[in-house]
Image: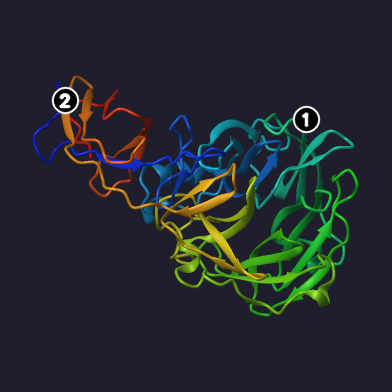
Amino acid sequence: MFLRAHKGTIRLLLILLLFVRSASGSYQNIVNDAFYLTTAGTPIYTQGGGISKFGNTYYWYGMQYAQMATYYANPIAANADGNSTFVAINCYSSQDMAHWTFQNQVVSTSTPGFTTAPGWVGRMGQVVYNASTGQYVMWFQYYGASGTGQACCTGTSPTGNFVLNNVQPTISNVYDNVTGDCTVFCDVDHGSTPYLVFSDAHGRQHAYISPFSSNYLAIQPATLISEWPQGQEASNMFERNGVYYYCMSNLAGYSYSSAYEVQSASILTPSAYTPDAAFAGTTINDTYYSQISFVVPVAGNQTTSYILVGDRWSENDSSYLSAGHGLGFNIMSPVTFSGTTPTFVPLTSFQLDAVTGNWRPMPAFATPTGLTATPGNAQVILNWDASGGATSYSVQRATAPTGHFTQIASGLTMTSDTDTPLTNGTTYY
């Protein structure tokens, strides 16, 4: 049987990607409201994670939970089933922050200490490298067979298998001695010193920062930075020009929300921090319908851009009605500055040049026209008219007119493509 090909049955969406070349770098497209895919076309599963840069390569680490595959297959609220069973901590690599290659499940249910499904694994932030020991170190919340608290895993390469080193049950100077939401922040401009940035578990009403021991295998006593009775969560930090920005979301659980920030030129001096204030731009559409996760600096040979990464959690229930909405598990969008004041710029898409460090809004280009689809046995041949100025094209496909659309080809320099294998008798869009 051949694919149905009458008008209205096969309609494939062409997404134009323009790559503008310069002498020193190239702009790459980052598109939100879609599931980020690897260079192999598989979904990127990284929630509650962080991006670290080792050498010239960015490494994105994050959690994969059981419900993510269900939600990716059919992204409706009913499939955001709240199944947060741990699957893995995944690692992806990129040279340009736009094209990500899957590297490894650096921690998985095959890792000792994780073979019996933990009650919770999450909220990690950056992986850090200790030059004295030669170890890569990650920390995250852990409730499982090996204990309850903050888990420390170590590895000998950024993409290799990590092993459980210890579970630290308490942190001194913290209300109830345990963490709420937390991330690891690496102060790359000041000796690459790492800190744990976190709230307490009791209502997320206190903001803390803890340094690590010299080998990064223990969390030192905490410094209380600030308090807010209403509670704020998703604690994370970034640094720019000697100013430290402590950022948080509303106390909204898995729902999307606006964000807050306080700032200081002295990371462990509570009195130096500014009063709690809204993170400008995040109130426009609740951090572009996400929960702030972290801000990553993209340092180039001309400037440094700051890219906010947000989580879109697929955890929809009666408590989190604003979760499980919108395509994608993450969003990326730039942060601009007026003096020391940061402003989040919520964009559907933008372009980033990781070589120069510049970003810009996505240029407006004409959508390719003249699309034709010629069916065959388990395949369809696509042809379209060239769009002025385009140097490459990308093709996305869905089995429903409203999506979700999966990228099936990218970097095409010709105005044709063969999509295979397909299922005979299926309608594609």
Rounded to the nearest angstrom, the CA distance separating label 2 from label 1 is 50 Å
Residue plotted at (62% across, 56% down): 295
Name the mark on residue 156: 1
- In the displayed structure, 223 sits above or below 27; it is below
- In the displayed structure, 95 sits above or below 378; it is below
> Residue 250: percent from the left, percent from the top?
58, 71
Label 2 is placed on what type of residue? Pro
Q: Quadrant of residue 222?
A: bottom right
N-term mark: 2 or 1: 1
Q: Is residue 4 left or right of residue 158?
A: left
Q: Is residue 368 left or right of residue 121?
A: left
The secondary structure type at the circle numbered 1 is: loop
For label 1, the crowd category at 10 Å Cα-Cα, with few meaning under 14, some 14 to 19 and many 20 or more, is some
On the question of residue 314 being in view, the answer is: no
Q: Nearer the viewer, residue 388 or 253?
A: 388
Name the mark on residue 375: 2
The secondary structure type at the circle numbered 2 is: strand
For label 2, the crowd category at 10 Å Cα-Cα, with few meaning under 14, some 14 to 19 and many 20 or more, is some
Cβ atoms at labels 2 and 1 below 8 Å apart = no
- In the displayed structure, 393 sits above or below 183; it is above
Q: Quadrant of residue 196?
A: bottom right
Q: Quadrant of the C terminus?
A: top left
Label 1 is placed on what type of residue? Thr
> Residue 61: percent from the left, percent from the top?
63, 42
Residue plotted at (65% across, 71% down): 339
In the picture as drawn, the residue positioned furthest to the left comes out as 6
Q: Is residue 402 left or right of residue 276?
A: left
> Residue 208: percent from the left, percent from the top?
78, 66
> Residue 126: percent from the left, percent from the top?
70, 48
Q: Quadrant of the N terminus?
A: top left
Q: Quadrant of residue 177?
A: bottom right
